[in-house]
Image (cartoon, helix red, strand yellow):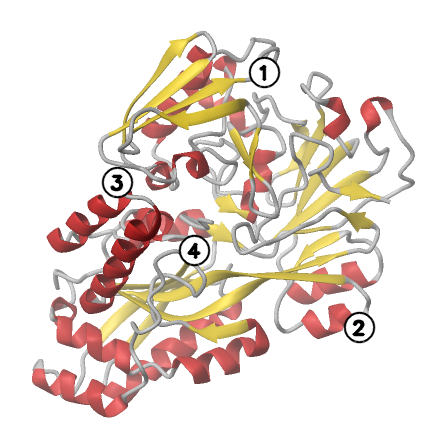
Amino acid sequence: MSAVAITLPLLGAAACSSSSGGSPGGASSSKLTLQFAGPPISLNPALGGNGLSSAFTALAYDSLIHLSGDGKLVPDLATSWNYVGQDNKVFEMTLRQGVKFTDGSPLTADAAVASMNYFRKAGGGLVGDAGPVDSISAVGPDKVRVTYKSPNPDAAMTMTQYHGIGTIIGPKGLANPQSLLTASDGTGQYVYNGKASVTNSRYTYDKNPSYFNPSAQMFSGVTIRVIGDAQAVLSAAQTGQVQFAGGAASTAEAAKQAKLNVLSAPFFNWTLILADSAGKISKPLGDARVRQAIAFALDRKGLANALGGQYAAASTQVLLPGTDGYLPQAGYDYDLAKAKSLMAEAGYANGFSMTVLTESLLDRNTTYSQAIVHALGDIGIKATLHVESTGIGQFSGDALSKKYPAIIFPSAGTDMFQAHNQISNGLFNPFGNKDRQLESTLAKAFASDGADRTRLYQQVSQRYHDLAWYVPVFSTQNLLYASPKLTNVKTSVLNPNPMPVAPTADLAWKSK
């Protein structure tokens, strides 16, 4: 799945667990407290993040379609959906009846359309995930139609809890978006309680008495606590304070020894983004030979082993193995002699200097970033890190400022449509790089199905390789720790970031 435009790890839980005796509606009487590494990008779903940070909004706002932990698309606010026609450009959804927002108003097609159009204009970091939307309209009291400017083969996936556009906000919240920072207005299982919350510390959610399926509400309340240190998370899990925690390669063995359930799935593709490929502020990066030299200069296997051990692997292209469009023969091997030759051929035998933007929330202590820029020194590139430590929101703003020619950040995606939507927008492409051949092949792929689409996706992988706008370095597993007392937590390559809530009881997390 898409993980990012902004996908954040280390979501865990410090649980205030008590007995799991039943309460009205079949829910457990226990409370669940989730841990996250930093504050939310925003509590407004139109401006929030994705991946595990989706919990800040998924608790209080239902999405049109739910992505389960095992990667299945499940009805939520939309009970059915389908394409109209054969070119993947018109997508329709039929809404669930009898659903109410926190403000008391009913869910209607008009309300859903208003929320989706607000998302498109709000300026959030996930807008690229929505695909090439042309218009959204109500074609009946309970039917929503999304028309795309060009084919979108993943329309259903974009409507899940991780992508923003399908996360529906009520009319009262839309009338005053600022109010969403202190009180939610969704249809979700829980309601955000701003009065009981402390900014940058804890975020509290109370049970929604009007939720459409009470049998799926497994906890009487949920809190998200901001805890960033991996050792502190492990300690909380070991002492029984935590039911669910975001893990790290450095603590995984200790978690196993403590008999925690360690779940993992491929997720982040750590990438050196050579954003200034036109050479506007760093002339050398405007030469494809320099970008390719950088790609050849990285010992990916060595870096992966040193930085992630068994939970990391060398990565040579924008997609990970096992995803639709991965091309086994593509990618740059480690060839320092070739890298130096290309640098000399481009006129930079003695290297050059540049500043690389990074952050310290996902890349704790900038361990990954330091290793990557250090390797560039082998071909004479003197790279200086500019570290943003206040949060992903500020980091994204810095990237979009066009002050930095190169950026280090991970991407995620389970096929080329998701990956391209992420890396062609926002902080991955602040200078607006375009390539006619790339766009032409993508357009054909998005209108295709089956083997034809896979073949075209592979051509796109090769073109990204040749352009060297993005230099993948290594991939990491998403590591999660779950107490044996917490059940029904599932992860997969299609969803490495499970949510505790689900529209049906069989998919929701439970406490023994």
Q: Is residue 89 left or right of residue 94?
A: left
In three-dimensional space, the C-alpha distance between marks 4 and 1, rounded to whole angstroms, equals 32 Å
Q: Amino acid at mark 2?
A: Gln
Q: Nearer the viewer, mark 3 or mark 1?
A: 3
Residue designated by label 3 = 447
Q: Amino acid at mark 3?
A: Ala
Mark 1 or mark 2, earlier in chain = 1
- Tell me the tag on residue 257: 2
Residue at the spot of label 4 = 412
Residue appearing at x 26%, y 36% in the figure:
151
Q: Secondary structure at mark 4?
A: loop
Which one is closest to the eye, mark 3 or mark 4? 3
**Mark 3 secondary-structure assignment:** loop
Q: Is residue 111 above or below residue 373?
A: above
Q: Label 3 neighbourhood size at 10 Å, few (<14), some (14-19), many (20+)?
A: some
The amino acid type, in three-letter code, at marker 1 is Phe
Badge 4 crowding class, 10 Å Cα cut-off, few under 14, some 14 to 19, many 20 or more, is many
Viewer can see residue 120? yes
Percent coordinates x, y for residue 253 in the rendering = 71, 74
Question: Above or below — where is 209 with respect to 455?
Answer: above
Placement of 150 over or under 273, stated as above or below: above
Q: Is residue 83 left or right of residue 67?
A: left
Task: Tell me if 374 is positioned left or right of 499 in this view.
Answer: left
